[in-house]
């Protein structure tokens, strides 16, 4: 089959932050080889992964972003390219393992529902109200995505303020049917104003930070962090294993009990 995609159309092939499993699921739902996408590397910030349906499997090719002397190049295997479109254009004509690149994977429509009001802080933001349904346009960063509302307006939204629509149907119906729904508060410091810092939180999701980010904490499920600051941007600060650093609040749950080693 002849490749027909435009390598310069980044919105067609770049899927941003995406797990290996999600890429596998999406590409394995396609029936032909050569369908691909480019996602962010989950292990090294700044690198990318070219994911390609090949025969009965999905191959994941790491793309290293190398910056030297103010010049950026992208390396895949032993090939070097000046940018990602050049790399993709090369593999339109050359085989990876069993196939060249044919076309980008289709995007699935992902709907979100707002858990809290968001007024927006910058011109690029998309304000919304609790319960409003939004459509994901791109997943640009871990904490900020681009979304579209029912009026067709697009902008940046904070990920902790929304969740997938299908996960909230039962939660939102209570308020719609007349029973008073529990009042939620946005995930920011004032929502925990009743707690005097420091407080303690238990890690619910592992996280290995970028090796170049010396101030980020490495998280393992079950770790207990001493939270010393709750920033409104969702990056909290705390102490873990003798190191003070920052971490995303979405990776922890606050706990009431004080660990034995912290009791005085």
Image: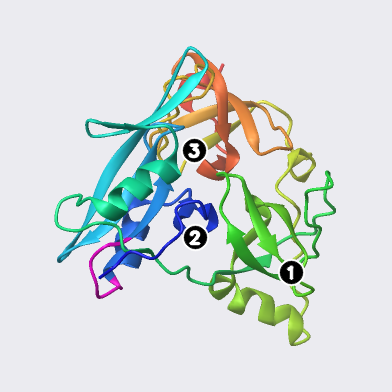
- Residue occupying the point 55% across, 36% down: 201
Residue 207 position in % (x across, y down): 42, 36
Where, by quadrant of the figure, is residue 98 drawn? bottom left
**Could you say whether the residue bearing mark 3 is in a helix, strand or loop?**
strand
Q: For residue 14, which numbered disc appears in the image?
A: none
In this figure, which residue is indicated by the disc labeled 1?
Answer: 149
Residue 84 part of the magenta-drawn span: no
- Residue occupying the point 60% across, 63% down: 136
Residue 172 position in % (x across, y down): 68, 76
In this figure, which residue is indicated by the disc labeled 3?
Answer: 202
In this rendering, is residue 25 above or below 252? below
What's the magenta bit mostly, secondary-structure-wise?
loop
**Could you say whether the residue bearing mark 1 is in a helix, strand or loop?**
loop
Give the extent of the magenta segment: 29-35
Q: Nearer the viewer, residue 58 or 264?
A: 58
Quote the CA–CA distance across marks 2 and 3: 39 Å
In this figure, which residue is indicated by the disc labeled 2?
Answer: 12
Q: Nearer the viewer, residue 179 or 248?
A: 248
Quote the CA–CA distance across marks 3 and 1: 35 Å
Where, by quadrant of the figure, is residue 230 drawn? top right
């Amino acid at each position: 089959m002849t490749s027909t995609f435009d390598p310069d159309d980044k919105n067609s092939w770049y899927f941003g932050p995406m797990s290996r499993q999600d890429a596998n699921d999406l590409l394995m739902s396609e029936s032909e080889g050569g369908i691909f996408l480019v996602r962010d590397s989950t292990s090294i910030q700044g690198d990318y992964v070219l994911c390609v349906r090949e025969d009965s499997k999905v191959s994941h090719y790491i793309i290293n972003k190398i910056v030297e002397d103010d010049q950026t190049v992208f390396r895949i295997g032993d090939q070097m390219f000046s940018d990602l479109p050049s790399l993709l254009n090369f593999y339109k004509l050359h085989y990876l393992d069993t196939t060249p690149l044919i076309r980008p994977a289709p995007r699935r429509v992902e709907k979100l529902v707002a858990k809290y009001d968001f007024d927006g802080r910058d011109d690029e933001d998309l304000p919304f109200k609790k319960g409003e349904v939004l459509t994901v346009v791109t997943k640009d960063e871990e904490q900020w995505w681009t979304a579209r509302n029912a009026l067709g307006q697009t902008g940046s939204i904070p990920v902790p303020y929304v969740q997938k629509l299908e996960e909230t149907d039962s939660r939102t119906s209570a308020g719609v049917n007349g029973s008073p729904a529990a009042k939620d508060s946005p995930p920011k410091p004032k929502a925990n104003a009743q707690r005097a810092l420091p407080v303690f939180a238990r890690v619910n999701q592992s996280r290995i930070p970028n090796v170049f980010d010396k101030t980020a904490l490495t998280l393992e499920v079950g770790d207990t962090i001493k939270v010393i600051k709750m920033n409104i941007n969702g990056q909290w600060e705390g102490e873990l294993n003798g190191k003070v650093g920052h971490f995303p609040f979405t990776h922890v749950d606050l706990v009431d009990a004080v660990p034995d080693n912290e009791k005085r």
